[in-house]
Image: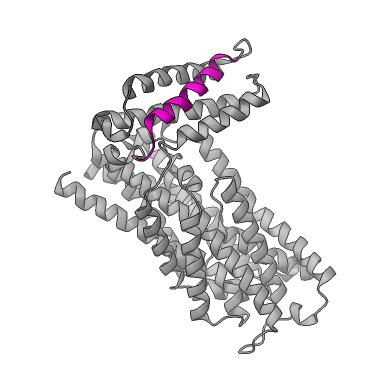
Amino acid sequence: MTTGILILLVVCLLLACTFEFVNGFHDTANAVATVIYTNSLKPTVAVVYSGFLNFIGVLTGGIGVAMGIVNLLPMEVLVDSNVYHGIAMILALLISAIVWNLGTWYFGLPASSSHTLIGSILGIGFAFYFLPDNVGGSAVNWDKAKDTGWALLISPFAGFVAAIVIMFIFKRFVKHDSFYKEPVPGKKPPIWIRMLLWLTCGMVSFFHGQNDGQKGVGLVMMILIAILPTYYSLDKQVNLQAVNANVAVIEKIISNTDTTQFGKDEFKNFNSIKKHAKHYAEITGAKLYSEDIAAAERFEIRKDIVKITKGAEKLLKSENVAISKVDANTLKKEIDGAKKLVEFAPSWVIIMISICLGFGTMIGWKRIVKTIGEKIGKQHMSYAQGASAEIVASIGIGVATAYKVPVSTTHMLSSGIMGSMVAKKGLKNLQRGTITNILLAWVLTLPVTIILSGGLFLLFRAIL
């Protein structure tokens, strides 16, 4: 590695940490908004409490969401014979995401870091179409982008409706009038209300770490694979022959499948699996670990596993593929086993992102807290409204993490606050100006970050 590339690698890693740091004080302010605004915890205690649980969430969250971020851009697009092209991509992506996050935070708007990141990634994909050699035909994994897009689109509506439902449940079973009153400045609520809000704040913070924290892990892995594919294409701890056994079972089940109903796409995936399974077996031979493989061939092994597992998953979802329930379950198990070779993150990456997110949570929370507590509804947020919004957000984020899709903490909680306000006095209870600004920020996030990241990418490609 040359000195220039080493410097750019460090810059990219610092920018990834900055994104996660900004994510902490931008997104996680939503988690501490209720306990701070309701006087349930002092600000210093609240942000440290939330920051710690974010840290734990990242450490325990696995890497499913992180790999979803990595897979939005096919890694064969990232790994170029000219390493500076990959660096240009990473720099454009990170700078555009950080600029938009800081801008919306400055104006106190609870915009989504998830949408910001997805928009920046899509901007890179679109920019490939404008390159002179026109290599951008497959620059975006549209299947993954579609799944991610649905999760991000549905979450605000789900949060809005679910918060209304929970408010009605509270009114049915919780008869304490104090629960539905606005906080009195400087006065602590009853202990049972404080304990409920401590719990809901902790849940949002923990699940935020498990979901949003993984996005930072995914960014760092994208950087490492793009710039150092020799070292980070494959997990050094995974036995190649164990994966070979997974691949053999996948190929066997697929080969025994009735192909008479196959269409063009099914045959394409069918032939791709057989081709890459053969190549994987040939290139690995009797070798046990990735360090035994020639450096130049390691990324080729990664491509084999990605093509095999993605192709098999598409066949499983196809209506034209007849497969027994037993074989389908076996196939899913073997796919998961094979993916372990390419879907991983070193411990130092997870710890680094955990620290950045945790410290970020402890800084810059005031702007978002004021918007959440006072500017969404015409009345200030009550204890019940804060609790209902955070219950909705924590459940929504937890479910999304379980299904390995990114979701917006900001959208879930802000829409939950809106729903809780509507549950009390209808739509007239919302502040039109604030809601308009928040919705405008939500709507503009994708197009602005797409244009910004795409433009920066083309600029950096011309410079580097």
The quarter of the image holding the C terminus is top left
Taking the spot 57% from the left edge, 14% from the top edge, the residue there is: 256
420 on left or right of 98: right
Along the viewing direction, whichever of 297 and 444 lies nearer the viewer: 297
Q: Residue 100 lies in what quarter of the image?
A: bottom left
Along the viewing direction, whichever of 464 and 191 lies nearer the viewer: 191
The image position of residue 136, as x and y in percent, is 38, 32
Taking the spot 83% from the left edge, 76% from the top edge, the residue there is: 175
Q: Is residue 92 above or below residue 30?
A: above
Taking the spot 63% from the left edge, 70% from the top edge, the residue there is: 199
275 on left or right of 378: left
Along the viewing direction, whichever of 196 and 379 lies nearer the viewer: 196
The image position of residue 300, as x and y in percent, is 33, 28
Q: In this view, does 369 lie above or below 272?
A: below
Q: Please, what is the dominant secondary structure of the magenta stretch?
A: helix
> Is 245 within the magenta?
yes
Q: Residue furthest bottom?
A: 186
Residue 437 seen anywhere in this rendered image of the structure: no
97 on left or right of 204: left
Magenta stretch in the rendered image:
237-257
Residue 28 seen anywhere in this rendered image of the structure: yes
